[in-house]
Image (cartoon, helix red, strand yellow):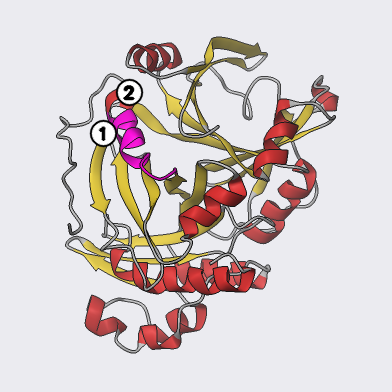
């Protein structure tokens, strides 16, 4: 089977029963929130936004919120042993716990999801302070990942009730990251269609593209992926599962070290990928590198592009084209000790696809890293 834009199960266009306005925030459970916040500021240009912890009345955890343009990350760590957050970090390492979705009506989104079969994580709750009120609710998804629905139309505060503004003197410059383009989830063998159906039936998403093991394979490993999108296209969730191969795939490696399904990577958009990647490299971020021969026939494969080839080759930026334009992308190495979560930096020049033409070169680069780790 080749790449297809039609789902195996035919769904109507994404329904309006759960309109999503965008990604509100992504919360990571980490072992040390203060150090994680410093990393995201220093290495990736995020700006300090809000804080909650002992000084705001919490006794079991602390959270630092950092922001760059429309991207908000919440970095949460336990303050004592025996907490659920600590157990999550112990099992999974640093990783995404919450993918929060901005909605007009958090009660309605919750009720619609639960009515369609979602497992409740948090019933609707009203949170208030002097800046107004926020309504939040939540459901479980794959692994221990959850979606929180956030309704903030009656709130004018910095982030959420319970948080205070965080205004340190340390403020490294932003690097041009703008918004979350998509978030990729890894699930176990045979589970991809279960979660594809979940997003279609429970949340009204549609499948916009599908890749099988012929599309995404190398000499040694393979995987399968389907991309789910909400109606306005602001939320896109590719779902990956491993496919049979001669050696352990990157998805299997992730599942082994994360100890279950979870968010594999966040793809964050920029409108100047060359400048952004140069700055990331200068700040210590390491990227996967493809062989220099990738660029020898690049223009033959993708046609004319606006960028000079020399800086793309220098930085290791990949290029792919679809019927609507082209895209540029590059992938970091894992950003924590376990070979689990990483970031993709992406710039779209009209393309709406996900870089199929780069899969082979990319996954061979990942396999070289796996071989160095002894996990291939």
Residue 171 in magenta stretch: no
Where residue 23 appears, as percent x and y from the top left, is: 46, 36
In-image side of 289 versus 279 (left or right): left
Image vertical order of residue 311 relative to residue 142, above or below = below
| Res 45 quadrant in image | bottom right
Q: Is residue 105 visible?
A: yes
Q: Which residues are magenta?
A: 187-200
In-image side of 61 versus 305 (left or right): right
Marks 1 and 2, how far apart at CA: 13 Å
Residue drawn 28% across the image and 32% down it? 205
Residue situated in front as seen by the camera: 126 or 148: 148
Residue drawn 25% across the image and 50% down it? 210
Where residue 101 appears, as percent x and y from the top left, is: 46, 30
In-image side of 346 versus 304 (left or right): right
Q: Residue furthest front?
A: 246
Instruction: For label 2, count other residues whose C-alpha is less than 10 Å away and answer few (under 14), some (14-19) or many (20+).
Output: some
Q: Which numbered disc, 1 or 2, marks the residue that appears first in the sequence? A: 2
Residue drawn 64% across the image and 57% down it? 335
Image vertical order of residue 129 relative to residue 53, above or below = above
In this figure, what is the number of numbered marks? 2
Residue 368 marker: none
Where residue 129 appears, as percent x and y from the top left, is: 67, 14
Which secondary structure class fits the magenta region best? helix
According to the picture, the residue beneath numbered tag 1 turns out to be: 231
According to the picture, the residue beneath numbered tag 2 turns out to be: 202
Q: Is residue 177 visible?
A: no
Residue drawn 62% across the image and 29% down it? 159
- Locate the N terminus and report the quarter of the image it occupies: bottom left
């Amino acid at each position: 089977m080749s790449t297809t834009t039609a789902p195996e199960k035919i769904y109507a266009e994404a329904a309006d029963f759960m309109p999503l306005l965008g990604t509100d925030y992504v919360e990571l459970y980490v072992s040390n929130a203060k150090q994680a916040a410093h990393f995201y500021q220093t290495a990736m240009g995020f700006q300090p936004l809000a804080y909650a912890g002992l000084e705001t009345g919490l006794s079991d955890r602390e959270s630092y919120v950092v922001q760059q343009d429309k991207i908000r990350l919440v970095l949460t760590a336990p303050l004592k042993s025996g907490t659920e957050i600590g157990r999550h970090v112990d099992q999974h390492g640093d990783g995404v716990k919450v993918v929060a979705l901005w909605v007009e009506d958090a009660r309605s989104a919750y009720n619609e999801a639960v009515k369609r079969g979602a497992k409740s994580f948090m019933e609707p709750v009203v949170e208030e302070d002097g800046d107004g009120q926020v309504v939040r609710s939540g459901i479980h998804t794959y692994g221990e990942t959850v979606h929180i629905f956030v309704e903030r139309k009656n709130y004018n505060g910095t982030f959420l009730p319970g948080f205070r503004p965080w205004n340190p003197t340390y403020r490294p410059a932003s690097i041009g990251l703008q918004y979350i383009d998509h978030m990729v989830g890894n699930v176990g063998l045979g589970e991809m269609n279960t979660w594809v159906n979940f997003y279609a039936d429970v949340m009204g998403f549609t499948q916009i593209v599908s890749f099988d093991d012929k599309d995404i394979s190398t000499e040694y490993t393979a995987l399968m992926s389907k991309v789910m999108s909400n109606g306005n296209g602001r939320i896109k969730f590719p779902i990956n599962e491993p496919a049979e191969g001669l050696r352990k795939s990157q998805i299997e490696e992730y599942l082994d070290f994360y100890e279950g399904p979870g968010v594999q990577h966040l793809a964050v958009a920029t409108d100047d990928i060359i400048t952004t990647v140069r700055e990331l490299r200068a700040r210590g971020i390491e990227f996967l590198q493809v062989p220099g021969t990738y660029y020898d026939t690049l223009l033959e494969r993708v046609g004319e592009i606006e960028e000079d080839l020399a800086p793309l080759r220098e930085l290791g930026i990949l290029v792919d084209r679809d019927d609507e334009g082209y895209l540029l992308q590059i992938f970091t190495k894992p950003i924590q000790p376990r070979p689990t979560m990483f970031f993709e930096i992406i710039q779209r020049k009209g393309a709406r696809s996900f870089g199929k033409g780069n899969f082979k070169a990319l996954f061979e680069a990942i396999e070289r890293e796996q071989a160095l780790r002894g996990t291939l």
